[in-house]
Image (spheres, rainbow, N blue to C red):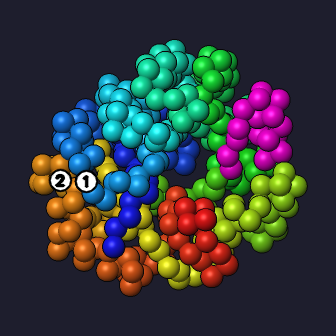
Amino acid sequence: MYKIEDINFMVSLFCPGKCVNCNIWQYDKNEIRKDELDIEVFKKLFKSKYLKETNYFDLTAGESQLSPRYSEVVKIIAKNKPDVFIHTNISGWYPKKHFEVTKECLKYIKKENFRLDISLDGSKESYEKVRLVKNGYEKVQETIRLLKPLGINLRVTMIVYKNNYQDIPWLVNFAKKNGIGYFIGYARNASLLSNKDNKYNYTNKELENIEALLEDVNWLDERRRPNWLWAKSIYQDKIPYFDCFMGQRSIVIDPYGNVFPCNDCLDFLNMGNLKEFDGNLDELLNSKKALAVIEKVKNKKCQPCSMLCAHKIEFPWGKQVGLQ
């Protein structure tokens, strides 16, 4: 049943930076760090027979590189999986910290297998409507300047909103000018982001405009089009039911050791906690609780679904990137 190809490990939910569309920054910084998964328990994951083909780790959640255990997590993963690919989203608001942590990580992992995505939601004017940290835009530029010479897989990431979508071409041109990659994603709601009350309302004309801009920059190739069609169906309240393999092919581990099929981290889809199994992932995944969650996912009990980060999906219009 299980063939875990990738894992999202939420290193920490701590994030002190304010953004319009995410409320993680409102969590109490001390409370949010309590009871995080012990690093010794995390090490035991790699004894799992279900991780033999795991080749991708997403280390994310809050501002992960601010966590004192981030580089240790990278070290453990690289030791057990020498050819693994590791990805992390960062704000770019801590240039010196990002640089120092990344240099430390490169002691353990090949630079070509280490990717950082820096949030850059458009030009300075658009960016400052979304990201509310003082001089955030300038800090991002400095972070890019420091990280680029390290030779890692570096990208800028834009999440498309009503107030910045006109800057899609700007982002692509910025990335090309600076010799780095880019990624375009779409706004979503999530319990973990504490933004469930946010409603992303687009007119049909706005969606047409966004799609035209995405087409103009050649973003909507065969690989990426399914995700945009999913996003559009969410904004139009026309989400289809689909076959989902999250939980079987990919898992999410929150900072406290809870295992979920996807990063919406819904309580009724909690497969179990690694602490209760002393890090034995196989026992957890074979437990009645975990198997019951897999059946819920198979039977679409969690749908309609708007978790745009889920990638082991087959839509009526094609396969999400994780199944391609």
Q: Quickly name the residue at label 2.
A: 280
Provide the secondary structure element on which disc 2 rests.
loop
The part of the image, by quadrant, that contains residue 277 is bottom left
Q: Is residue 137 left or right of residue 221?
A: left
Q: What label does residue 254 carry, if any?
A: none
What residue sits 21% from the left and 60% below the top? 282
Provide the secondary structure element on which disc 1 rests.
loop
What residue sits 53% from the left and 80% below the top? 242
Whether residue 173 appears in magenta in the rendering, the answer is: yes
Amino acid on which the number 1 mark rests in the picture: Ser
- Please identify the dominant SS of the magenta region: helix
Q: What label does residue 48 carry, if any?
A: 1
Q: Which residues are magenta?
A: 168-184
The part of the image, by quadrant, that contains residue 300 is bottom left
Amino acid on which the number 2 mark rests in the picture: Asn
* Quadrant location of the N terminus in the rendered image: bottom left
Mark 1 against mark 2, which lies toward the viewer?
1
What residue sits 53% from the left and 34% below the top? 114
The part of the image, by quadrant, that contains residue 65 is top left
Is residue 174 in sight in this rendering? no
Q: Residue furthest right?
A: 216
Residues 239 and 88: in front is: 88
Q: How many marks?
A: 2
Callout 1–callout 2 Cβ contact below 8 Å:
yes
Residue 285, above or below 236? above
Query: Quick one: label 1, few (<14), some, or many (20+) residues within 10 Å?
Result: some
Pinpoint residue 163: horizontal percent, then vertical percent.
Answer: 72, 49
Is residue 93 in sight in this rendering? yes
Residue 313, above or below 280? below
* Quadrant location of the C terminus in the rendered image: bottom right
Whole-Å distance between the Cαs marked 1 and 2? 7 Å
